[in-house]
Image (cartoon, rainbow, N blue to C red):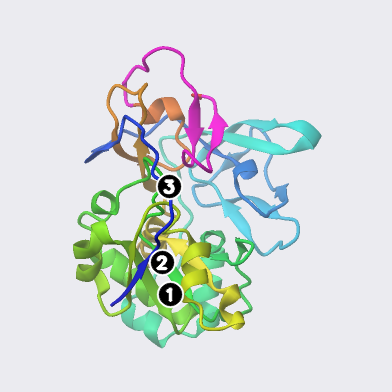
């Protein structure tokens, strides 16, 4: 286990911190895909309004890298495709059907992953729509699958206010996390687990041998900051990274053969009656995440984080 202390940083004083409990929400009536929220891509639509699609079917691709397909988080009918300025695809709303008819992908056990060729593991992640979760420094683009990175970092959290607590989203899923690490071992020979010191016991229980324990305030757990303080030479500037919940999604894809569609979110802030963690479908509306907690007056909604998030509407 290694340790890294960042002396400078910022700590926002905000009220409405989500409680460290998770509430499982029912399935929403609609989910949405938001291409505008995905950095470093130019989307090309593969479906149109009123099309019937399966859960896990491709709905758009990257014009620059057509091999990167982005999959539907639900099965049903495309009821709306909203365009912004200059025809930017803002979101695609899907009304869920009773039978979502999920696309099936091959499954692999831990032993089969260890014996598999690296190219087969990469192809499985691309076909399963999860490769865009792997980002490459220094520009944080989607990683180039033809390269082997000098290092790969897995971050349990990023210290932004109100982000999901790893103590919550990892509850009962330590085996899945360890399974996901086996997947990453095929992508890179040097995988490092990064966790803040307040989660030291949790991280050590998962994998203490490759643990980098971070101490400090935001942005101490930022991938660029960590790389700056740990790199040994300039060749490591192109290292890759992803986050803990992304790793759980990879494990679910390999173990179940279905496109993973659930995730743990947080609802926080001074205007929320019940700041808490919620687990529900990817692409669920903000008003669904509120779980019946009526906001205290007019509110501004941010998706993705206080510092780096984007404004969204309740629907």
Q: CA distance from mark 3 to mark 2?
A: 22 Å
Which residue sits furthest right?
86
Marks 3 & 1, CB-CB < 8 Å contact: no
Asked if residue 108 can be seen in this view, the reply is: no
Which quarter shows the N terminus?
bottom left
Identified at 31% across, 21% down, the residue is 293
* Residue 35 magenta-highlighted: no
Say which residue label 1 marks: 184
Work out whether residue 202 or residue 177 is closer to the camera in this orientation and state it.
202
Identified at 67% across, 31% down, the residue is 82
> Which mark, residue 10?
3
Residue 141 picture location, percent across and down:
63, 61
Q: CA distance from mark 1 to mark 2?
A: 9 Å
Q: Nearer the viewer, mark 1 or mark 2?
A: 2
Range of the magenta residues?
A: 291-313
Which residue sits furthest front?
7
Say which residue label 2 marks: 154
Identified at 59% across, 40% down, the residue is 34
State the image quarter where residue 3 is shown.
bottom left
Which of pointers 3 and 1 lies earlier in the amino acid sequence?
3
Work out whether residue 152 or residue 75 is closer to the camera in this orientation and state it.
152
Marks 1 & 2, CB-CB < 8 Å contact: yes
Which of pointers 3 and 2 lies earlier in the amino acid sequence?
3
In terms of secondary structure, where does tag 2 sit?
strand
């Amino acid at each position: 286990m290694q340790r890294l202390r960042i002396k400078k940083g910022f700590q926002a004083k905000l009220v409405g911190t989500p409680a460290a409990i998770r509430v499982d929400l029912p399935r929403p009536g609609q989910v949405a895909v938001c291409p505008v929220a995905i950095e470093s891509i130019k989307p090309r639509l593969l479906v149109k309004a009123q099309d019937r699609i399966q859960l896990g079917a491709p709905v758009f691709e990257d014009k620059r890298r057509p091999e990167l397909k982005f999959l539907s988080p639900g099965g049903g009918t495309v009821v709306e495709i909203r365009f912004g300025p200059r025809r930017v695809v803002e979101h695609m709303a899907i009304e869920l059907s009773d039978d979502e008819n999920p696309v099936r992908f091959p499954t692999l056990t831990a032993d089969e992953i260890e014996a598999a060729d690296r190219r087969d593991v990469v192809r499985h992640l691309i076909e399963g729509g999860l490769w865009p979760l792997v980002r490459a420094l220094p520009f944080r683009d989607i990683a180039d699958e033809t390269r082997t990175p000098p290092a790969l970092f897995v971050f349990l959290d990023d210290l932004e206010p109100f982000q999901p607590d790893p103590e919550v989203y990892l509850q009962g899923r330590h085996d899945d996390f360890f399974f996901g690490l086996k997947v990453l071992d095929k992508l890179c020979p040097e995988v490092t687990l990064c966790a803040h010191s307040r989660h030291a016991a949790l991280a050590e229980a998962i994998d203490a041998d490759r643990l980098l324990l971070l101490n400090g305030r935001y942005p101490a757990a930022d991938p660029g900051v960590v790389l700056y303080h740990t790199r040994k030479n300039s060749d490591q500037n192109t290292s890759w990274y992803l986050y803990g919940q992304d790793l759980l999604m990879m494990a679910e894809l390999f173990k179940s053969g279905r496109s993973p569609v659930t995730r743990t979110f947080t609802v926080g802030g001074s205007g929320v009656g019940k700041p808490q963690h919620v687990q529900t479908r990817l692409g669920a509306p903000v008003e669904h995440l509120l779980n019946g907690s009526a906001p205290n007056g007019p509110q501004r909604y941010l998706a993705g984080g206080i510092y780096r998030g984007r404004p969204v509407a309740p629907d």
